[in-house]
Image (spheres, helix red, strand yellow):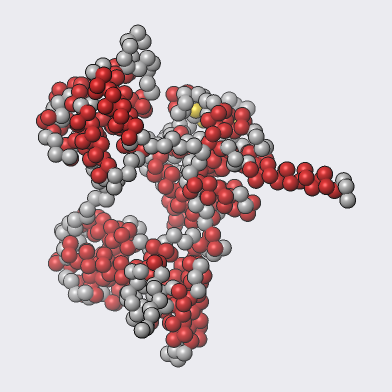
Amino acid sequence: MTSQRARPIDMAFVRSGTPMFAEIIDQLQADKSLSNARRRDMISGLRRIAKALGLPPQDVPCDSRWLQPRLAKIAPARLGLTAKSWQNAVSDARAALVHFGLAERRSNRIEDLTEDWRILWSKVLAEKDRTLQPALCRFVYFLSKIGVHPSSVCSDHAQAYHEALLRNEISKSPEVGFRAAVNGWNLAVRRIPAWPKIILPLNSRQVIIAIQLSEFPTSFQKDLDDLILRLTKPDPLAEAGPGKVLRPATISQYRRQLVRFASELVHSGIAIGDVSSLDFLIDPVMAERGLRQMLSRTDNQTTKLISETAALLRNLARILDAPDDVRDRLVSLAKRVATKPQTGMTRKNRDRLRVLQEERNQLRLLLLPKRIFARPVEKGGRFSGLLAREDALAIAILLVCPIRIKNLAGIHLERNLHRPGDGHVYLVLQDEETKNERTIEFELPRDIIRWIDAHLKSRVPDLCQSGTPWLFPRRDGLGPVGANALSARLSKRIRNETGLEMNAHLFRHFAVMTWLDANPGGYEVARRLLGHSAVSHTINMYSGLEARSATRAFADLVARKKSRHP
């Protein structure tokens, strides 16, 4: 009886018979149709990719769907490679796959297009639109190659392009390429007069659960408005309800969560007209039904949002002076879906900080802003160059002022940057801007002040209009950039430039780690640095973070004692 070795889980979805990198390397070495230089480049590209994946070539399949998600996670800087070197390696490896028919050859010469597409594409090139050309190029060549006339393009052809990307893209995201192509096509409809007036549909990636408040009964809207007013102006002598004014952000969050929960009830099958009051939400039957609807979206796993919603319903019953049996039922529901309070950092953040304990990785991060500002901003790439400097400025500030990303994104040039006139500049966050309602103040180092001043002089009009009062503005200058958008930008910038996995909040952990590493047990300074209200919170969060330096100091102490008695 012939026994078959079980396939590794990692290869479970790779089609049987798919060749491995090692096989096509052997075939390339024997292929006399290629020049020595081309053969060498292809083999080098395959080996470099296998090395980047941490696998021998015999364990890397020539399968684009297997390769793409893995190569997309690789940061060339982490491997000691420039972005260009990595791009060349991927290109050479892909050329090897194309040579053996394992991927489609790309066309990029205008002569490769059919006459109708060539005329149309020439109009796009003549516009020199830097938005349209990169988004549309590959899609246009694909449509020409499969013989589709420009006037006949439809959503089926867009889906076919998506499938082709899935089969042929080995490093970039097929989904991103597909969405860029469809958005580019629809943009061309508006910008290029000769472009076919065909709008291609594109499904939204956003799952919208909350129903507009205006769609609920007027009585429910009034109930909610009355509650918000009560939270905004509480009665200090009332037995039920809050005794102090809640922060605007907290009140806004309560409003969103209650509308969201009412929407969950509608999604569960309750008629929207029946959701007529807040009392309806805290009915134990309805509360359980809504929470079950939320759990159905998470495979019956409780989440922070579900836990907070159940707790809000429990508190709402107290504020509305509901009967004792209703309160008891809601307390029980809240306990059942409560999440365990987080103590300390998450495992993911600890793993990332462990990488940053190495001095060479610390220096990569610490010197990144200076390195970016040292680059000249090229005339042809002013926008990307200035955007890189804006990101570098944000990183530089976070390295010395470990504030929350919302505060960073909202820095106002006059309200938050104080210049007393003696050359010093202070970053000041007022109590109403901070999470624990305590003013925080940092003195900015001189190099950051120079970068801020230089950036403010050069950013107009590429990044914003003159007179924009925000350090990190939206492109229309009407407000600050969104905190999530800025955070995503910084993570991507750091990953591309250094290979390090870093999110905006991790800067706060990094600051405390750096301080405690040099000053084991120095929690009071760490508390002030982060703006925590109590040192106990800082200790609970970061206890043990200074273990490496503490154990090293103890080992040195033991060694010194031993050295006295040879």
Q: Is residue 308 visible?
A: no
- Can you give x and y, in whole percent of width and height, for residue 494 in the image? 50, 51
Residue at x-position 12% and y-position 29%:
274
Horizontal side of residue 536 vs 476, given as left or right: right
Instruction: Name the residue furthest bottom.
Output: 32
Q: Nearer the viewer, residue 196 or 484?
A: 484
Residue at x-position 45% and y-position 52%:
492
Image height check: is 61 above or below 27?
A: above
Task: Check the picture and name the quadrant holding the N terminus.
Answer: bottom left
Horizontal side of residue 242 vs 428, given as left or right: left
Instruction: Name the residue furthest top.
Output: 237
Q: Quadrant of residue 165?
A: bottom left
Q: Nearer the viewer, residue 312 or 153?
A: 312
Horizontal side of residue 353 vs 238, given as left or right: right
Q: Quadrant of residue 100?
A: bottom left
Residue at x-position 44% and y-position 73%:
60
Image height check: is 149 above or below 202?
A: below
Horizontal side of residue 177 vs 443, given as left or right: left
Q: Quadrant of residue 307?
A: top left
- Can you give x and y, in whole percent of width and height, for residue 256 in the image? 28, 31
- Can you give x and y, in whole percent of width and height, for residue 303 in the image? 35, 40
Q: Is residue 23 visible?
A: yes
Residue at x-position 27% and y-position 22%:
327
How many labels, in total?
0
- Can you give x and y, in whole percent of width and height, for residue 353 in the image? 55, 47
Image height check: is 436 above or below 11?
A: above
